[in-house]
């Protein structure tokens, strides 16, 4: 009798635990993602400091020497003449307005809403025949854009480059390997070996998003594991293989993404949301 | 499961005596031991589940990377001359050195399957054909692989580390 009681207690315990386990779900919460209707999704900040004395400039946190090493162009004497007479110039595109500010004084302000953009597109279309797709892409980039170009007369190092782009950069690879970015031919092409690999893997499109070191990617709409790179890790790789990558902090502060379409592959939808 | 529920529903032991389906006192010893073992295992798993299924730690493996390998250069470049690889089958793989994170990878069985599929297609030589031939001979293999992955991801996560030194 006692044994039977023990069995019974054990069975009841099992049933209870199983019952609780089966009905217990991992608590989930659906995050209320606030609509960011008024918030810019494509943000670019470029700071340039220049020294008319030495006729050198620093851009996006890179020194004049580093920029020379990367092959950055030199300013023309005419431009130096203009810059020497100013302390600062700021070109700012925000809140559907395009502002030009020189020495803290507003020089010009142009309306940059959808209607005014359409007028500009119309003018451009009359000259260079923009296609419908190009106009759509231009709107995807410029709608809710926040762009600032700041030029300062200073010997200080410029602020790091800030790039936070939600809109995917459209990259098309033609069947012959030619690469276009946003419909503009780059003159670059992928090698036949890489083309063969793409065909072997049956890749139609790739979506890749970089968000401050976190890489999310999809191939043909199927997600790949999320990879997180750290600056420390990249320094180790740099030292191990002598890559001479330089200061990577600007790129680790940036967010951007690309939609790469091969041949007649399906278009990639969505954005890279930080 | 249905049998157990029936017993519980009937309540007291006299009724169980009269139950035509289950006679605990007449069960063979083997069956009783099996049932009890199964019950204990289920009980332990229930507790494990309620605790959030923490990954079960496995012993750490130490690996001395031979000189001349690419990995050796990486280990040497860390400064601490040690790289630790931590795999948690619940979906993360991270590589650290002296406590500093170098790379992290978050995965699910689906993302791993996509990667494996892609890697097979991009593998050099006739690896993909060889794999296809293998699958033709053992058609159960892809399912086995998938279910093993699902098992260690969802049901019984484990974690282990590999410490790589020069």
Image (cartoon, grey):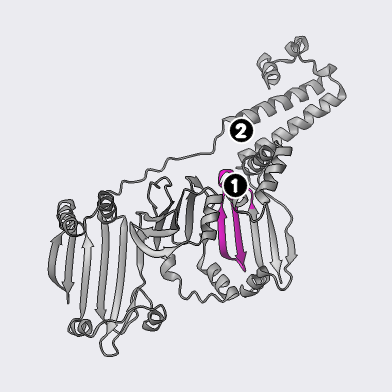
Q: Residues within 10 Å of mark 1 (few under 14, many from 20)?
A: some
Q: Is residue A147 left or right of residue A261?
A: left
- Circle 2 Cα neighbour tier, 10 Å, few/some/many (<14 / 14–19 / ≥20): some
| Label 2 secondary element | helix
Res B108 seen here: no
Q: Nearer the viewer, mark 1 or mark 2?
A: 1
Chain containing mark 1 = B
Quadrant location of the N terminus of chain A in the rendered image: top right
Q: Residue A56 placed where, x, y %?
A: 31, 85
Task: Tell me what residue is drawn at x 46 percent, y 71 percent.
Answer: A248
User: Looking at the figure, which quarter contains the C terminus of chain A?
Assistant: bottom left
Q: Residue furthest right?
A: B29
**x, y (%) of residue B93?**
60, 55
Residue, x 59% and y 49% (percent of image)?
Answer: B91
In the current view of this chain or complex, which residue is farthest to the bottom? Answer: A53
Q: Position of residue A35 (x, y in %)?
A: 31, 46
Q: Chain of mark 2?
A: A
In this rendering, the count of numbered labels is 2
Residue at left 85%, top 16%? Answer: B26
Q: Which residue was labeled with disc 2? A: A21
Foreground: A51 or A34?
A: A51
Above or below, A191 against A204 in this view is below
State the separation of the CA atoms marked 1 and 2.
Answer: 34 Å
- Residue beneath disc 1: B117
Magenta span covers which residues? B88-114
The vertical placement of A273 against B110, above or below, is below
* Residue A208 to residue B150: above or below: below
Residue shown at 65%/71% (left/top)? B75
Membership of B100 in magenta stretch: yes
Mark 1 falls on what kind of element?
helix
The mark found on residue A74 in the picture is none
């Amino acid at each position: 009798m006692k044994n039977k009681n023990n069995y019974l207690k054990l069975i009841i315990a099992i049933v209870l635990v199983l019952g609780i386990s089966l009905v217990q779900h991992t608590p989930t919460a659906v995050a209320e993602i606030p609509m960011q209707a008024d918030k810019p999704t494509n943000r670019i900040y470029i700071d340039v400091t220049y020294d008319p004395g030495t006729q050198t400039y620093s851009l996006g946190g890179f020194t004049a020497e580093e920029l020379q090493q990367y092959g950055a162009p030199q300013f023309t004497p005419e431009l130096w003449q203009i810059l020497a007479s100013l302390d600062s110039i700021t070109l700012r595109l925000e809140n559907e307005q395009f502002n030009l500010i020189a020495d803290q004084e507003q020089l010009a302000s142009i309306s940059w809403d959808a209607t005014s953009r359409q007028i500009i597109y119309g003018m451009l279309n009359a000259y260079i025949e923009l296609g419908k797709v190009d106009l759509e892409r231009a709107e995807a980039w410029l709608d809710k854009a926040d762009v600032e170009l700041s030029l300062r007369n200073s010997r200080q190092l410029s602020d790091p480059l800030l790039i936070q782009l939600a809109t995917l950069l459209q990259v098309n690879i033609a069947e012959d390997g030619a690469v276009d970015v946003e419909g503009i031919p780059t003159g670059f092409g992928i090698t036949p070996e890489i083309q063969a690999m793409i065909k072997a893997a049956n890749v139609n499109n790739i979506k890749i998003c970089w968000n401050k070191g976190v890489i999310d990617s999809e191939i043909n709409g199927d997600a790949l594991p999320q990879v997180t790179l750290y600056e420390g890790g990249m320094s180790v790789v740099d030292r191990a293989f002598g890559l001479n990558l330089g200061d990577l902090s600007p790129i680790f502060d940036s967010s951007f993404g690309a939609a790469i379409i091969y041949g007649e592959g399906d278009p990639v939808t969505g954005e890279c949301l930080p | 499961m249905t049998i157990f529920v029936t017993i519980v529903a009937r309540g007291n032991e006299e009724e169980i005596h009269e139950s035509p389906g289950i006679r605990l006192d007449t069960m063979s010893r083997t069956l009783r031991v099996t049932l009890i073992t199964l019950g204990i295992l289920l009980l332990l798993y229930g507790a494990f589940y309620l605790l959030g299924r923490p990954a079960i730690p496995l012993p750490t493996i130490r690996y001395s990377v031979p000189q001349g390998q690419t990995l050796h250069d990486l280990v040497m470049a860390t400064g601490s001359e040690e790289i630790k690889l931590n795999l948690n089958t619940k979906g993360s793989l991270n590589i650290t050195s002296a406590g500093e994170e170098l790379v992290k990878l978050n995965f699910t069985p689906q993302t791993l399957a996509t990667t494996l599929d892609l890697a097979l297609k991009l593998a050099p030589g006739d690896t993909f054909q060889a794999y296809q031939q293998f699958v033709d001979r053992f058609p159960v293999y892809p399912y086995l692989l998938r279910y093993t992955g699902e098992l260690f991801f969802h049901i019984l996560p484990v974690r282990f580390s590999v410490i790589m030194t020069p």
